[in-house]
């Protein structure tokens, strides 16, 4: 990589974070616009039952997340030898095309197809951009590198998603997604202008990337993210109807609730990046404990306006506190397949997105009320904590095995 001035380095990092900003918009704006999507695309179902129609519209979230799950490991495998900057540029083209297709498609089925295509590039972008950022920051700053890219996503939740949600409520959800496509196009130009070229990992190959899946820890840590983060998405996916139907606020309050949650995510991400570079596994355990506590609080107090805003902030902070730690942890358990490790984390968290949104829709459609996803979220977060403890136990056993073998090797020599 070419030598960078401090100004060029930060300009490059901001360009990569702008892509994270666009991803935050395209992923989370749907959650605030589900009622508009349901009214526009499923008018007959909405007239019969608004809750049933909103639950069906939740497939817009689920299908995007499934695209991430499929696309992240696939693209990581096929692009193992591709230079990181070139890969990021190609992914930004996919985002732009997929988002425009989502906005212009005439039917619900075609919109789901467009969302799936847009989701394919999501996980690979965070992986490639995070590795680019980490390489520019230098050794010992891996979690901070991913935290910077994730900061774009959290910033989107502070002011971008509320603004896009407001635009969608006034001009229609299609206009909102066209605005998101413009953000991706702008990011493409910024990356072209300021991000330096970084070679792919030495000796990288599709076979080498796929070798990551031979590690039980890769599967276990991915399961930690897929189950545990489902608790956050079970709540976040239905924050719009909770705001209006449970708390009794108007639709104009939805962007403000999303903004407060995004502020919590931003603060949690910054603190989480620092904590993860000090102790990865401890950060994950603390994060899950905090997520369980804050989701319980949400279920208890979301019926009151002050409680809704306070609990939304705390859930956002607890969830993103773990983001940099889980990303760095998956890379650490797949050291020879860093792009795959980074991509698998995104697949896992978006499987959590799909799982949380789908199961949340199921409990709502069953007639258990709009707050039922919060209690589902508590169970999922608790499952994530138990899996994280199992991963720590497996790591300790592997360390003991290595320590036992080393003296034996010394004696043999």
Image (cartoon, rainbow, N blue to C red):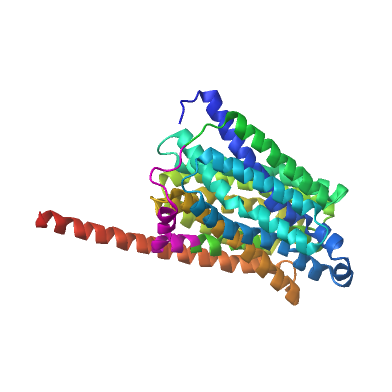
Q: What residue is shown at x 79% (from left), y 71% (from top)?
A: 52
Residue 326 appearing in the image = no
Vertical arrangement, residue 100 with respect to residue 132, above or below: below
- Position of the N terminus, as image quadrant, is top left
Could you tell me residue 331's position as x and y percent? 44, 51
Instruction: Compare residues 133 and 326 and report the one nearer the observer.
Output: 133
Magenta stretch: residue 26 in it? Answer: no
Q: Position of residue 187 (x, y in %)?
A: 66, 37
Quadrant, the C terminus: bottom left
Compared with 197, 102 (above or below) is below
Residue 16 shows in this picture: yes
Check if residue 204 falls in the magenta segment: yes
Q: In the displayed structure, does residue 170 sit left or right of residue 204?
A: right
Quadrant of res 16: top right
- Looking at the image, residue 377 sits to the left or right of residue 369; the answer is left
> What residue span does the magenta drawing correspond to?
199-222
Q: Which residue is at 61% across, 34% downward?
A: 191
Relative depth, front residue between 147 and 300: 147
The x and y percentages for residue 353 are 63, 60
Residue at left offset 59%, top offset 62% = 352
Choose between 252 and 60: the one closer to the eye.
60
Most frequent secondary structure within the magenta stretch:
helix
């Amino acid at each position: 990589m070419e030598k960078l001035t401090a100004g060029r380095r930060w300009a490059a990092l901001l360009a990569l974070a702008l892509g994270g900003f666009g991803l935050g918009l395209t992923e989370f704006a749907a959650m605030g616009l589900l009622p508009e999507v349901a009214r526009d695309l499923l008018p007959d179902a909405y007239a019969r039952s608004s809750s049933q129609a909103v639950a069906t519209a939740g497939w817009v979230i689920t299908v995007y997340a499934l695209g991430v799950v499929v696309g992240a490991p696939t693209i990581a495998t096929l692009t193992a030898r591709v230079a990181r900057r070139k890969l990021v540029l190609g992914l930004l083209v996919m985002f732009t095309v997929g988002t425009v297709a989502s906005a212009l498609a005439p039917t619900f089925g075609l919109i789901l197809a467009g969302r799936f295509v847009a989701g394919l590039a999501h996980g690979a972008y965070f992986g490639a951009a995070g590795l680019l950022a980490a390489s520019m920051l230098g050794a010992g700053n891996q979690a901070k590198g991913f935290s910077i890219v994730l900061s774009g996503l959290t910033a989107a939740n502070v002011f971008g998603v509320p603004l896009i949600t407001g635009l969608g409520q006034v001009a229609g959800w299609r206009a909102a997604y066209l605005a998101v496509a413009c953000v991706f196009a702008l990011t493409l130009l910024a990356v072209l202008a300021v991000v330096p070229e970084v070679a792919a990992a030495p000796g990288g190959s599709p076979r080498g990337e796929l070798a990551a899946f031979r590690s039980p820890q890769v599967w276990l840590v991915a399961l930690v993210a897929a189950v545990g983060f489902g608790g956050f998405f079970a709540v976040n996916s239905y924050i719009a109807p909770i705001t209006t139907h449970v708390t009794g606020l108007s639709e104009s309050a939805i962007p403000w609730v999303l903004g407060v949650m995004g502020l919590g995510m931003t603060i949690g991400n910054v603190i989480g990046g620092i904590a993860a570079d000090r102790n990865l596994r401890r950060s994950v355990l603390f994060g899950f404990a905090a997520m369980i506590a804050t989701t319980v609080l949400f279920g208890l107090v979301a019926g009151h306006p002050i409680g809704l805003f306070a609990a939304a902030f705390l859930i956002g902070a607890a969830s993103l506190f773990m983001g940099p730690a889980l990303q760095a942890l998956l890379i650490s358990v797949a050291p020879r397949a860093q792009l795959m490790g980074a991509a698998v984390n995104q697949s896992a968290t978006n499987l959590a997105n799909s799982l949380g949104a789908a199961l949340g829709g199921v409990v709502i459609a069953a007639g258990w009320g709009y707050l039922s996803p919060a209690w589902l979220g508590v169970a999922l977060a608790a499952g994530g904590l138990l899996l994280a403890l199992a991963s720590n136990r497996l790591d300790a056993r592997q360390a003991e095995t290595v320590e036992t073998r080393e003296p034996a090797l010394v004696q043999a020599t």
